Image (spheres, rainbow, N blue to C red):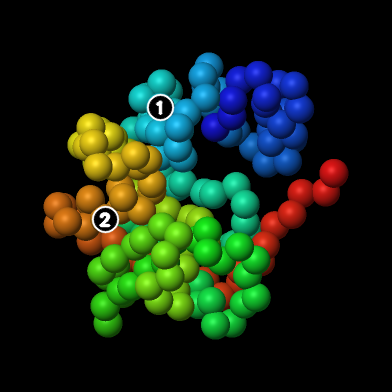
Amino acid sequence: ILDKYEGAKDGIKQNMLDKFNRNIHVVELENNTKSQSETVYRAIKDVGINGAILVKDSDGYFEASGFDDNCVCYCDASFHNISRIQNKSFITYNEEKIILNIVEKQVISKMFSVGGYYFNNSLDFINAYESLSYLEEISEVYISNIINKRSEEHTSELQSHSFISYAVFCLKK
């Protein structure tokens, strides 16, 4: 998902199409959004995405495959020297690896999200976003808010998956 003007100006869209070398759909939004979740919401609505979606933060790299259930990709911070760790989302989960809590920018455990969020159904994302975006006590709707909302509704339990191959991804100028 790209800002229409920045994507064209910097050649980002063409670079993505060249890099992936397969049939992908790059969504260009006309206007800026206030948050990552709003960007995802608008892309789903504008393009009419139905079915599963993977939300991937742009500031990191990890490898994962075979998503079957709603999940959050995470890593144990004990094993990595992560810069700007205070800006990450942290999770707690039970013995069955069902997420109990996910919190933005507050260390609640040694497990942090590496920036991969899989939703089986884009409609679930839309419904959760819409119900949260109208709440006055929430100034910005984070992906973690969406996940917590979905967990509270018990319509689907989000399972966390641990991926030990985590590295910070830096673009060269």
Label for residue 166? none
Residue type pointed to by label 2: Asn
Find residue 114 and report its horizontal and vertical position in percent: 52, 62
Residue 53 in percent (x, y) is at 41, 43
Pointer 1: residues within 10 angstroms few (<14), some, or many (20+)? some
**Label 2 belongs to which residue?**
148
Q: Nearer the viewer, residue 157 or 131?
A: 131
Task: Give me the residue at 69% from left, 36% from top.
Answer: 16
**Residue 79 seen in this snapshot:** yes
Residue 95 is left or right of residue 155, and the answer is right
SS class of the residue under badge 1?
Answer: helix
Q: Residue at x 14, y 52 (%)?
A: 153
SS at badge 2:
helix
Looking at the image, is mark 1 or mark 2 earlier in the sequence?
1
| 78 to 143, vertically: above or below | below
**Quadrant of image for the N terminus:** top right
Q: Please tell me how many numbered marks the rendered image carries.
A: 2
Answer whether residue 69 is visible to the viewer in this image. no
Answer with left or right where residue 169 lies relative to residue 108: right
Image quarter in which the C terminus is found? top right
User: Is the residue marked by circle 2 packed among few (<14), some (14-19), or many (20+) residues within 10 Å?
Assistant: many
Q: Which residue is mark 1?
A: 42
Marks 1 and 2, Cα distance to the nearest angstrom?
A: 20 Å
Residue at image point 62% right, 56% down: 60
Q: Position of residue 51 (x, y in %)?
A: 33, 39
